[in-house]
Amino acid sequence: MCGGAAWQIDVDDGFVEPPGAGAGFERKQLGQGESAGGHAPNLEKMPARHTVAVVPLLVGLSKNRQHIGRPFVGSGYSMTVKIRDGGRESKRRFGLNLLLRTPAFRVGKRLLIMQRTLVKDALHSRTERESLLVQGWVRTRRDSKGFSFVELNDGSCLANLQVVVDAGASGAEQLADFTTGASAVVEGKLVPSPASGQKWELHATRLELVGRADASYPLQKKGHSLEFLRTIAHLRPRSNLFGAIFRTRSRLAFTVHQFFQQRDFVYLHTPIITASDCEGAGEMFRVTTLPGKSEDKPEADFFGRPTYLTVSGQLEAEAFACALSNVYTFGPTFRAENSNTARHAAEFWMIEPEMAFCDLAGDMALGEEFIKAMARFILEQCSEDLALFAKFVEKGVIERLKFVADRPFVRVPYAEAVAILQQCGKQFELPVGYGLNLQSAHERFLTEEHFKAPVTVFNYPREIKPFYMRLNDDGMTVAAMDVLVPGVGEVIGGAQREERLEQLRENLKYRHLKPEDYQWYLDLRRYGTVPHAGFGVGFERLLMFLTGVANIRDVIPSPRTPGNAAF
RNA sequence: UCCAGAGUAGCUCAAUGGUAGAGCAGCCGGCUGUUAACCGGCGGGUUGUAGGUUCGAGUCCUACCUCUGGAGCCA
């Protein structure tokens, strides 16, 4: 199947045996400098451009080894294997804990260890596979006379693997327990499916029920309402939609890191417990070890002062930007607001880049680039899950994302945005006027109807923005910006920070804040101050924007909202 | 927190103030390749909770609880 000699590994150590005749090998073509993969890290030193046949291995441990049903993670086991390379033969010793990082299960008195194939990889196979092993959860079973179809899903992708079980297959007598929700291991032959609907199917040679799911299992193969699924938040990841959402969430998080890492931003872990009440960004959760009313004597508390869960990492990010130039945070954030809406959670994840030697224009540019990059990512990299969102969540989500990815962002000063809203002739529920916050209805009008493009509104009146934003030369406005997109409204809020010591002091005074509470923050202006800017993105809101999911409770694994911390 | 709506079988929903029902799921049986399979049968309820009006309440009234949508706050 490729150039170069094939490596074959046999095992001669008494308790480790080579696979029996006919058992399938997982073959991997190695490119130059590539390692053999996580299942056999000790093979890294093998010359490149060889095919390495490593797994499945059939392993029988001595009787007193009882590691049934879980991977080897301990140390102390090793085995010797013979390696044949054409005519040459050599022996190498491998640590089992390294080699066998793969699930194990008992067959009689033996421990069988076989490389698991993910459903995703099975479905994307280029060739038939003589023998492979999949593990997952039964989505549904359809019985016919003499055989059954079992749909197996392991979360590696949206699609299920169709398993065909003949009555004669080993373990077929357990088929009645292969109900929706049960977990199972299936070994079989991957062959082209004669019916339409799937390219490949697995003809089971052996199946094993791992965990039953009785008739009370709440998930059915039919669609469920999002409201119902929220009441079973621990089981909803087993549904198609939530599988898609949380796969996307994971990949999006990775892409966020990639976006900033590629631009030489330093990932900063800002504290989760904080003493700074600086933001005024909302009610904070108190952190205390004192019983009863802790506010009474904070000096006796664990930290000797009142402490809270963070509402923002921005101030700390500014400190590090004023040293490392470009930084970003990506972590949990907490707001104890009693807000009960589809867009608010008490615990959420926030991304906050902060850039030294950067002004508002640079800040807006990065924010816009970021949103476009995330839209492009999901369009290009998550097409299967995105198709599900387009089908069941928001019909126009793909068009909306293309719209954002393609169009240049319109930039409009706040005063101009207000004038547009006042002159548009449209009657809004809430008043529009200079000095008032833009409401979500106003924001959506600007981006969806007036400009028909993503919009960045900047230079807001000083009165409606926090103390740390930089005062513009007009003395009236601050260098703040909000990025608005169709369908969602505000996705980014940011600003150039006030870097002038005296002006920052004046800002604190203007807000009736005490300078002594902001000593270290003022220090940043006292020593080597620089113009700097940043913004915040709610990760869940970004996910809502990208998937079309309308409720924040459905894009976070365990939603925390007022009165709800179950799961 | 404010405003509005909803709460009936495991799920999704019906039921003019007058005997609480259907589809799906589940269970049993049938079916030679199914795709939210199909066909036949069976079981399934303190109508969110507590009061009240009425001969009679799932239905009307009051309070509370929960959920949903909108608003405020924001990310």
Image: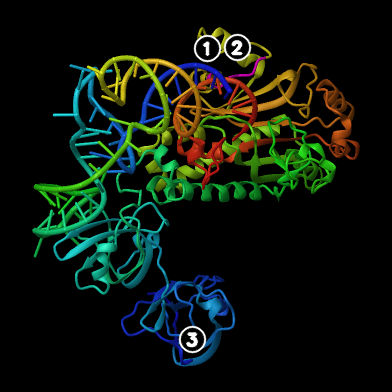
Q: Position of residue A305 (x, y in %)?
A: 82, 42
Residue identified by numbered label 3: A64
Disc 1 to disc 2: CB gap under 8 Å: yes
Measure the alpha-carbon separation of dots 1 and 3: 76 Å
Is the residue under label 2 in contact with that under label 3 (CB below 8 Å)?
no
In three-dimensional space, the C-alpha distance between marks 1 and 2, rounded to whole angstroms, equals 8 Å
Is residue A355 located in the magenta-colored stretch of the structure?
A: no
Q: Of the residues shown, which amino acid type is indicated by label 1?
A: Phe
- Co-location on one chain, circles 3 and 2: yes
Secondary element at image label 1: loop
Residue labelled with disc 1: A428
Q: Which mark sits nearer the N-terminus, 3 or 2?
A: 3
Going by the numbered disc 3, the residue's amino acid type is Asn
Residue drawn at point x = 58 percent, y = 12 percent: A420
- In front of the other: A557 or A409: A557
Q: Is residue A490 above or below residue A297?
A: above
- Mark 3 residue element: loop
What type is the residue that disc 2 sits on? Val
Q: Is residue A440 magenta?
A: yes
Question: Circle 2 is placed at which residue position?
Answer: A432
